[in-house]
Image (cartoon, helix red, strand yellow):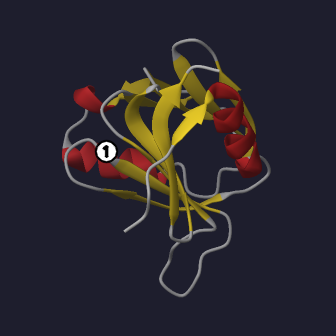
Amino acid sequence: MPKQTQLTLAEIDELLQRLVGLPINRTWRGYGSVVFFEIGELNNDKVGEFTFSADKSWALCLANEGCHACYDLELKEMNQLLEKFVGAKVIEIKLNENSLVIELDENKSIKIDNYKKDNWTLQLGDETWCTRYVRD
């Protein structure tokens, strides 16, 4: 079972910057409002170099459609929206006091509100970095 780790803001930022330049090669929906993004090259099990997941306070944004929050979507709509993110490349990651924003090419983005509240994870192999923010 992957370990969950407490990270400082600087450590979170350093870890997330490893995603910049990589494409989203697969998306999928978990239980409830959980969404997964397989980022980087996929292995034989369709798992990316990194697996980013978000739960509860996320929104997926498309320039021509605006932002769609998890609580506004039916499951079918969520699946259709996730498909639109396949192939998008991570170009920038921004952290501020209340949100984590992953900017993608093609004017797409993933926004996580209250990202310090255990509602996202980033996994590489059998290591999971999460999500419990501790003050610097």
Does any portion of residue 66 appear in the rendered image?
no
Name the residue: 43% across, 49% down.
82
Residue drawn 54% across the image and 49% down it: 85
The reply to whether residue 38 is visible in this rendering is yes
Q: Quadrant of residue 62?
A: top right
Question: Where does label 1 land, which residue?
Answer: 78
**Which x, y percent locates residue 87?**
63, 58
Residue drawn at 19 percent across, 39 percent down: 74
**Where residue 80 sits in the image (x, y, percent)?**
36, 50
Quarter of the image for residue 32 reads top left
Left or right: 131 as drawn, with respect to 73: right
| Horizontal relation, residue 23 to residue 52: left or right | right
Q: In this orientation, which residue lies closer to the viewer: 109 or 47?
A: 47
Label 1 environment density (alpha carbons within 10 Å; few <14, some 14–19, many ≥20): many
The count of marks equals: 1
Task: Say what secondary structure mark 1 lies in.
Answer: helix
From what the image shows, is residue 61 above or below residue 17? above
Residue 104: percent from left, percent from top: 68, 39
Amino acid on which the number 1 mark rests in the picture:
Met
43 over 36 or under it: above or below: below
Q: Who's the residue at 53% across and 26% down the image?
A: 134
What percent of the width, then of the height, locates residue 24? 61, 57
Quadrant placement of the N terminus: bottom left
